Image: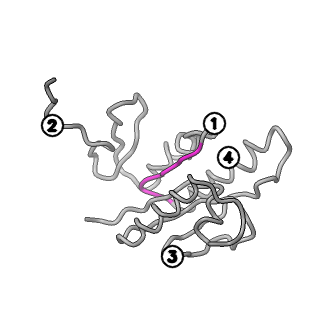
């Protein structure tokens, strides 16, 4: 198996992965566990995080953390677009992932994955896009295989 470069967009997970004091919720703990597990299995694992005073790029437990933006920078009401959205996009362009994992509610949703130059965040190093079986959106993949495997046979009731 070829290791994948996996990027987690986890703006608030810095404290969960680093162990520093600060906000840590259930989603952040799950992301930190997934990050460490994937890194331990040999994948090239990255986390795009907000700026909580960490260096621009630092490795913690085999996970490379890429700093994206200062959480309260920018003009209220507009900071969603800049520096948040633009900061995440720039960080993903630096990381150039094969796969992007994002667990973010609300308007932030999958926008970084749809907006990154060169089609989508997941396509940064891809050569051929594939279609997700449940979506009209095209999700790029390296091998041309479906992003989610379809069952070969259907169950009868």
- Residue visible at 56% across and 56% down in the picture: 93
- Residue visible at 63% across and 40% down in the picture: 108
Q: CA distance from mark 3 to mark 2?
A: 38 Å
Q: Position of residue 81 (x, y in %)?
A: 73, 42
In the picture, measured across the screen, residue 153 lies left or right of residue 46, that is: left
Q: Which mark is residue 61?
A: 3
Work out whether 6 lies above or below 65.
above
Q: Earlier in the sequence, mark 2 or mark 4?
A: 4
User: Which residue position holds label 1?
Assistant: 106
User: Which residue position holds label 2?
Assistant: 152
Q: Earlier in the sequence, mark 1 or mark 3?
A: 3
Q: Are marks 1 and 3 in contact (CB under 8 Å)?
A: no
Q: Nearer the viewer, mark 4 or mark 1?
A: 1
* Element carrying mark 3: loop
* Element carrying mark 2: loop
User: Which residue position holds label 4?
Assistant: 85
Q: Earlier in the sequence, mark 2 or mark 1?
A: 1
Work out whether 104 lies above or below 107.
below
Q: Are marks 4 and 1 in contact (CB under 8 Å)?
A: no
Between 40 and 118, the one lying in front of the other is: 40
Q: What is the span of residues highlighted in magenta in the rendered image?
A: 96-104
Graded by Cα atoms within 10 Å as few (under 14), some (14 to 19) or many (20 or more), the crowding at tag 4 reads some
Q: Nearer the viewer, mark 2 or mark 4?
A: 2
In the picture, measured across the screen, residue 151 lies left or right of residue 133, that is: left
Q: CA distance from mark 2 to mark 1?
A: 34 Å
């Amino acid at each position: 198996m070829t290791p994948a470069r996996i990027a987690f967009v986890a703006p608030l997970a810095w404290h969960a992965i680093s162990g520093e004091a600060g906000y840590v919720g259930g989603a952040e703990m799950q992301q930190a566990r997934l990050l460490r597990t994937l890194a331990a299995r040999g994948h090239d694992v990255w986390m795009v995080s907000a700026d909580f005073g960490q260096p621009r790029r630092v490795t913690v437990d085999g996970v490379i953390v890429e700093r994206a933006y200062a959480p309260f920078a920018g003009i209220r009401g507009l900071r969603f677009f800049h520096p948040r959205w633009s900061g995440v996009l720039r960080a993903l362009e630096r990381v150039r992932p094969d796969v992007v994992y994002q667990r973010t509610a609300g308007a932030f949703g999958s926008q970084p994955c749809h907006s990154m130059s060169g089609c989508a965040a997941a396509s940064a190093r891809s050569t051929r896009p594939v279609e997700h079986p449940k979506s009209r959106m095209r999700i790029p993949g390296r091998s041309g295989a479906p992003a989610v495997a379809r069952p070969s046979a259907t169950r009868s009731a």
